[in-house]
Image (tube, helix red, strand yellow):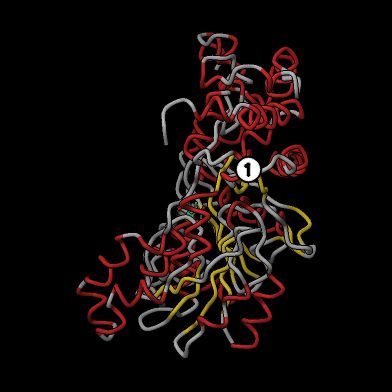
Amino acid sequence: MKTFSSRLSRRTFLKQNSLAGLGVALASSSVAALPVMGSKSAQLPAILGGPSAWAEDKWPVWPQWNPATDEKQLLEVVRSGVWSRANVVTQFEKEWAAALNVKRSLAVVNGTNALVIAINQLGIGAGDEVLVPPYTFIASVSSILSNGAMPVFVDIDAETFQIDPAKIEAKITPRTKAIMAVHVLGLPVDMDRIMAIAQKHKLLVIEDACQAHLAEYDKKKVGTIGNVGCFSFQNSKNLPIGEGGAIVSNDEHFMDLCYSYHNFGNPYGTAVGSVSTGSVMQGTKLRFSEYQAAIGIAQLKRLDAQTTTRNENAAYLKSLIKDIPGIVPYKLYDKVNRGAFHLFAFRYQKDGFKGLSRERFINAVKAEGVPCMSGYSTLNTQPFLGETFKSENYRRMYPKEMLDINQYNEQNKCPVNDKICNEEAVWFTQNMLLGTKDDMKAIASAIEKVHHNVDKIKTLGQK
Ligand SMILES: *Cc1c(COP(=O)(O)O)cnc(C)c1O
């Protein structure tokens, strides 16, 4: 390990060991680069050749990894030769369940398949409809289609970016089986209203908490409020393992079924490698591995503190930018105790920037050394839906009129989401929220600088 480290420059070393290096390296370097609000915004914007508000490579790297604290158990696993699911996966599942205060957790290959398994074992399939917001990662929807069910889109609330509870009931039909509550951006959905609607109409609630590790609503961790919660441990997520996912629930019988399904349909508790028990149900193989679990256990140790930092920095950044005309940050529902802030999102309203397009705003902020992006495109209009409906499989499962993509598109319009995706949303990624207060000031000052200089920026070509 020493030889690996010593080959790297000091800066790269600090970046790669960002847990150890983060506080010290970034805190000290950020003092020198500290933008002074006001005076800096008078400078020429970087997109016009002025100095950047920030150096892009200063942002906390992701994922974080500290050889000194993170590698002991991982090396033990690697050297043991026990790599398929065994004690370390079980340990990780217990720790994840404890972190969420939920009875059971099952680690699986990824968040997508956590959702696929959950939907499958809730008995949702051909002919069933699942209500889902369009403002999410594609896996929320593909997990419904993988089970032969039909996604029905419910528009979002522009202020929170979440599924709008007020628009759910109009979408319920006799075929509706479940609501997928996606805590997108790592911000909790309005779960009281979702649960009340679900109870009234006897619907299941699947929480897609793939972006919402340790987020809390009404003192409960998200993912533990509905019938089942699903998490992702993909590299960009707040608990990164490269790939990985988990299903959590307080329903032990349901969790036994999920376990069986993810392990060839063998009875719950069957040891990996056993071929003698026989399968009690149809299953597949979606198991987590021991070295993934060892990485997860190491990452879990820092998740709570990181989540606190993200919450503090998000609130601070929000306070710094909320009064800039044209910047409307995310809103949280009243009962939210804690966000996960997988992303920090705000609406960019170009009227506040003399009509400067979002694309040009983003480019100008990026030029200041502050990475940002426009986020999701509209999921409910993408070609995969029509392609799925054309498949032999779907044509066998559904009457023709349900597979008419024009009619489907007509029934699944989400104008609020269209506006958010096509015109307004701007994201900062979660790792930026692990920086210092000065880092948050740098973000705010970059936006202020663009705002202050919008006339000059607009002269840069026409758009
Ligand atoms: C990442 C993500 C998933 C899928 O998780 P993977 O581990 O990447 O398969 C599902 N839903 C949402 C909202 C996600 O962000």
Percent x, y of residue 149: 38, 76
Horizontal arrangement in the rendering, residue 435 relative to residue 395 (left or right): right
Identity of the residue drawn at 69% across and 26% down: 442
Q: Nearer the viewer, residue 424 or 309?
A: 424
* Res 441 quadrant in image: top right
Frontmost residue, 369 versus 339: 369
Q: Is residue 107 above or below residue 228?
A: above
Question: Considering the image in quadrants, where does the N terminus appear?
Answer: top right
Question: Is 376 situated above or below 37?
Answer: below
The answer to which image quadrant residue 117 occupies is bottom left
Residue drawn at x 59%, y 14% is: 51
Residue 215 is situated, as x and y percent measured from the top left of the image, at 70, 55
436 or 231: which is nearer to us? 436
Reading the image, the residue beneath label 1 is 352
Residue 14 picture location, percent across and down: 62, 17
Identify which amino acid the numbered label 1 is placed on: Gly
The C terminus lies in quadrant = top left
